Image (tube, grey):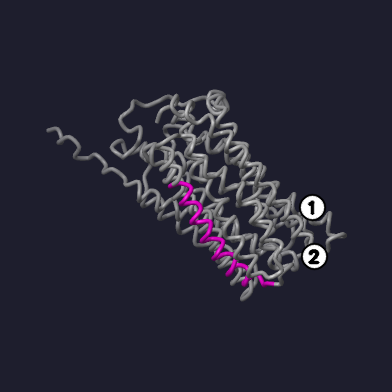
Amino acid sequence: MSEPAGQNTPKPQSLRLVLAVLLVVYVFNFLDRQIVNILAEPIRRDLGLSDTQIGLMTGIAFAAFYTCLGIPIARYADRPGTNRVGLIAGALIVWSGMTALCGQAQNFVQLLLARIGVGVGEAGCTPAAHSLIADLAPPEKRASAMAIYALGIPIGTLLGMLIGGLLADAYGWRTAFMVVGLPGVALAGAVVLSLRDPRRAPAALSAASMAPPRPALSNREALAEILGSRAFVLLLAAGSAAAFLSYGKATWTTIFFQRTHGLTAGETGFWFGIWGGVAAIVGTLAGGWLADRFGKINRRHVMTAPAVGFAAAVPLAISAYVMTDWRWALALLMIPTALNSLYYGPCFSSAQGLVKPEARAMASAVLLFSQNLIGLGLGPLFFGMLSDWIKPIAGDESVRWVLYGAAVIGFIPAFFFWRASLRLNEELDRKGP
């Protein structure tokens, strides 16, 4: 006797549940990635490192492997038979374990290798997560959905600075690494138990759930699909410049408050972590909301807030770094922090709409490749080398002068976001949902 139709059909998976779980994963992603910024000054003193070595450890050691592995892992995530939930859970186990190992490092080389391991693990997270979200969220809500996922950046950074700083002051930087790293291993089990890939649940609420299966694209076809979009190439330039600015400032602003203003790691993590985190959360949510709200009127306005935000942040950031009172500096930095956070939802949602569904994880990986190699890899390193270079002239004020230059870089992403906006109507309309 045949079973009634739909009797064994899996229930649709809520987009809210998926976003909630992926947000927690992304919080751990950035907690483990960014905690090294607040611990950089204690590590430097303990291991006797130079500013250039700090830049290598916080930036390129992570970014080189994160970016190089991101694309092949994304191609694997785009394959119809890949379980993206299992991929994310496995990646979480790797990067969490390697974060804990950072606390066991006895010299610069060991710490560098552990940071490389964190990058290897984290390469498996975001492209697969973006692909999942794009499958489940309708096009008119993708910017907001991506912005909710992106809250993991400011929340994870906030917790990394707060928890890392307090633990470093109380127990030392080694304990801080181990305390934040180990819980991620347990979280991986919760991910597997709570989520399922919509590819394996045909009745799930997916934007493409009723469409016939599409064949996988070859590597060449996927890259041609992505790089054939002029709007995507402009977003690539804008996102990379934004990341160069954001990652470079994130590392050296925390060092600035400790070295120039005399705060401890715990004090910096508490004050800058909380207020900077709140500002970034507000900016990230506002960016997604503004993109969905005004993108309905004219799709070019999806990029208006990021373009205006980065340009407007330049004079405000310079004014903050001029201040000799750290309280005024902190207060002034909140506005440019929020303005520089407007871009994530609009940028990544547009990237998902500019390519075919079977190239979505690859599109995120290419964007992340450029952002992390240029931004995370070179931003902290470049600013560290520049600080060492001008230190004979500026002394302990070298970081302040480096941050003046970092602020001015904000005009570059503003220009490219504006240029990308001019092509969005034509290209998004042509691609459809």
Regarding mark 2 in the picture, which secondary structure is present there?
Answer: helix
Q: Position of residue 165 (x, y in %)?
A: 61, 69
Residue at 48% across, 56% down: 282
Q: Position of residue 221 (x, y in %)?
A: 53, 23
Residue at 53% across, 59% down: 279
Which residue bears the numbered disc 1? 386
Q: Is residue 179 left or right of residue 147?
A: right
**Mark 1 surroundings within 10 Å by alpha-carbon count, few (fewer than 14), some (14 through 19), many (20 or more):** some
Q: Determine whether 112 is above or below 211 in the image.
A: below
Q: Position of residue 161 (x, y in %)?
A: 59, 64
The mark nearer the N terminus, 2 or 1, is: 1
Q: Determine whether 211 is above or below 27 in the image.
A: above
Task: Give, as a single range, the part of the protein colored magenta.
Answer: 263-289
**Mark 2 surroundings within 10 Å by alpha-carbon count, few (fewer than 14), some (14 through 19), many (20 or more):** some
Q: Nearer the viewer, residue 76 or 147?
A: 147
| Residue most extreme to the bottom | 170
| Residue most extreme to the right | 392
Q: Which mark is residue 69?
A: none
Which residue bears the numbered disc 2? 396
Question: Is residue 114 at least partly visible in the picture?
Answer: no
Q: From mark 2 to mark 1, how far is it between C-alphas?
A: 13 Å
Q: Quadrant of residue 384?
A: bottom right
Q: Determine whether 54 is above or below 298 in the image.
A: below
The amino acid type of the residue labelled 1 equals Leu
Q: Is residue 233 left or right of residue 290?
A: right
